[in-house]
Image: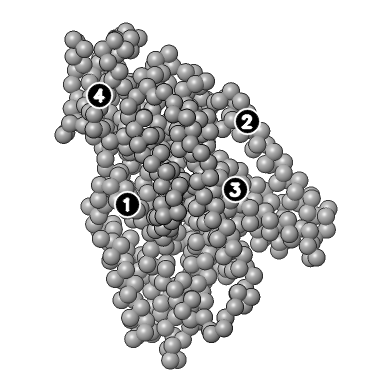
Amino acid sequence: MITYIEFGLVLAAAALAFAFPSLGSRWFEASERALGRLAGRPRLAVLVAGLSALAARAALLPILPIPEPAVHDEFCYLLAADTFAHGRLASPTHPMWIHFETFHVLWRPAYAPMYPPAQGLILAFGQAVLGNPFWGVWLSLGLMCAALCWMLQGWLPSKWALLGGLLAVIRLATFSYWANSYWGGALAATGGALIYGALPRLKQSLRVMDGLLLGLGLAVLANSRPYEGLVISIPVLAALLAWMTGSSRPPFRDSFNRLVLPTGLLLGVVAALMGYYFWRVTGSPWHMPQIVNRSTYAVAPYFIWQSPRPIPAYHHAVMRDLYLNYELPFWRLTRSLGGLLLGECARAIELWTFYLQSLFTLPLIMTMATLPYGFSWRQISPGTRFLLMATGFGLAGYALEVFYSPHYAAPGTCLAFALVLGAMRNVRSWNWRQKPVGLALTRAIPLIAVALVVLCAAWGQSIWPRDARPATWCLQGGYNLMLDRARMLARLEREPGNHLVIVRYSATHDFRLEWVYNRADIDASKVIWARDMGKEQNAELLKYFQGRRIWLVEPDLTPPRLSPYPAEN
């Protein structure tokens, strides 16, 4: 519904811009002067963008309370948070691990999540310092919007950079799934903004701090979205190399002392820490946990040019269902030209609906529509050409992946905002029949963005269907589907004693609705979730956990049923 409302508001704004381009000019001019004064203090503007994200998400807590995890990946990141919050990089393999086997989790040689550690680390900070992993998500939103504002200051005039940071608050830090789940996105977007913000500053004035921020951005990307981060980093590194070796290159000594040495040392330390983490989890400093987990369970590869792996022996039908009945057909779709094109179209729609929608598409279309006849590529400013080429390179790299989701492309978020804000800046000066139509259009965009957030807040959670696809800036897919598990867990945590819950699925169970996830220290947990593996194997588990109250949960009943575990079983 909100998508259609947004489209209607964009059409109405376009009509009003042509009919009454000076409508509200006095109010807009006063607002723009205030924005310009704040933007004239760049550091304060960056701080305001970050704090605005924190304030906006905190203000929405009565409507959007601290979310419950729902998706496999979220439980994996929460396991990482719990592991790190207790001062460990991994936990010993549990003797009963086969009963707890679940998605995206390693069990041998250690019990650990498979994903890179950046998201888990910030969630762990929220858990250990602020009392709940969600506050790590909250902090990441502020970091992202501040970094986006800082990045845009390197490419656009200060007032446009501040506007971009505030638009990021509205579109990404309020109702998006980045702000209402543990799935990630904000950290990778922060890493991308750091490297693209450092590039123009380094070329303008070689400073050690900018080199360190470049290295920090690369480190964040390597530990959040390694492949997509690498793809989006290549244009920046290539541009720096071309500048350092070109005709206008700085003295070698300056480049080495202020950029190569400090950035290289930072990245060397990060690489050593990553190798140590890999060693603690997988037993080798060269083997990423994600690769080890995929080699253990998955059949379909990550990239379209790769071949499938042999089918492993699965201990549980639900895991076989994900890897063979969902992922493998997804990969097979890429083996034909028609299937590949269909997948790429679906991927493009996912990206458009989340990052642009009709509101941000308007200035892009207007920019192309108002170009003069005979306009050529060379007439585009060098900075914009670079951003366009970097975006194309990133999209090409993203298109090589089999699976996709909007947060996979998060490292390139800054590119999307830079191009949209650049288009708004160009459209602003466009006149139609001596009327400032472009000015009216660009003024309408932030106004519509604010109005849509207010409308979403007024409607509350009722605007979200139970499984919305594709995800947009205000639609979250599937985040109500696991509330039954959360309510059951809360109930058991209020009960006296410790509990063991045997999860029994039906033959038609949906693999997306996974109930078997546990904390880092399984034996010390008040509530433990385990798979039903039949009478004999369950008996081994019950013997190990003597003294706990044993329950049977049947998630596929309506409503899910929790009952004492039958003694005869």
**Residue in the picture at 67% in, 53% down:** 237
Mark before the other along the chain sequence, 3 or 4: 3
Q: Which residue is mark 3?
A: 230
Q: Quadrant of the C terminus?
A: top left
The amino acid type found where label 2 is placed reads Trp
Residues under labels 3 and 4: Cα distance?
42 Å
**Residue in the picture at 37% in, 67% down:** 358
Mark 1 vs 2: CB contact within 8 A: no
**Residue in the picture at 64% in, 56% down:** 236
Report crowding for label 2: few under 14, some 14 to 19, many 20 or more residues within 10 A (C-alpha): few
Q: Secondary structure at mark 1?
A: loop
Q: Which residue is mark 1?
A: 469
Q: Which residue is mark 2?
A: 286
Report crowding for label 4: few under 14, some 14 to 19, many 20 or more residues within 10 A (C-alpha): some
Mark before the other along the chain sequence, 3 or 1: 3
Q: Secondary structure at mark 4?
A: loop
Q: Which residue is mark 4?
A: 504
Q: Secondary structure at mark 2?
A: loop
Report crowding for label 1: few under 14, some 14 to 19, many 20 or more residues within 10 A (C-alpha): few
